[in-house]
Amino acid sequence: MTTSLDPDSSLRHKSLAAEKSPAPVALITVSDSRTPETDANMRYLREQLDTSGHPVVAYRLIKDDPEAVARTLDELSETEARVLLWNGGTGISPRDTTFDVLNARLEKTLPGFGELFRFLSYQQVGAAAMLSRAVAGVYRGRVVISMPGSPAAVRLAWEKLIQPELQHLAWEVARR
């Protein structure tokens, strides 16, 4: 019997996932100050996804407003995107509401994403990593990943957590 902690099982799943077509991705930046022209995170993620062969099928730049976050989540969960990559709005200031909306709506959570992100972030920024409310899970058959909006945080999340498992995540959430 294999378990989710069995490295052979994980390797088999990743191998099966690699045989599938690339995962369509939606990019969402939550910011009250960025514009499409100044959205460095979108440019970075789009470049990384293009290099990895995963098509970007939607892009949204929205204000950190609970209704806008909820509306965008619902809208993009009706598209071909299998993975929704959010950046911004994960802090603890009164204006940071992205985590609150997404976390309340996730049907399944992936606590390991936030835990690992904060662990890796701690190695870069020290105790300030505890202020991050990075979160991931599943909503309406889509993988939802929400990371902080700083470019360093987006790079860290992409390089260490998202890119190595993106195809596997998209395959797992869609398989029957």
Image (cartoon, rainbow, N blue to C red):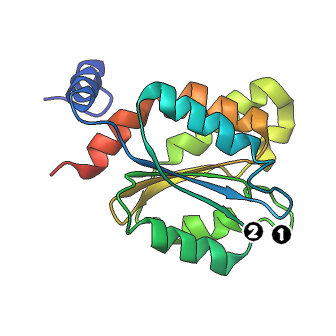
Q: Is residue 64 above or below residue 86?
A: below
Residue picked out by circle 1: 95
Q: Amino acid at mark 2?
A: Asp
Residue 153: % across, % down: 73, 37
Q: Nearer the viewer, residue 140 or 82?
A: 82
Mark closest to the chain's N terminus, 1 or 2: 2
The residue sitting at 25% across, 32% down in the picture is 17
Q: Is 91 left or right of 144, judged from the image as shown?
A: right
Q: Specify the farthest residue to the front.
A: 37
Figure check: 132 above or below 44: below
Q: Give the CA separation, mark 1 to mark 2.
A: 7 Å
- The reply to whether discs 1 and 2 touch (Cβ–Cβ < 8 Å) is yes
Is any atom of residue 76 visible in this view? yes
Nearest the camera: 84 or 125? 84
Residue at far bottom of view: 67
Disc 1 crowd, CA 10 A, few/some/many (<14, 14-19, 20+): some
Q: Is residue 164 visible in this depiction of the protein?
A: no
Q: Nearer the viewer, mark 1 or mark 2?
A: 2
Query: Would you identify the image quadrant in which residue 120 lies?
Result: top right
Tell whether 51 sits left or right of 47. left
135 vs 162: above or below: below
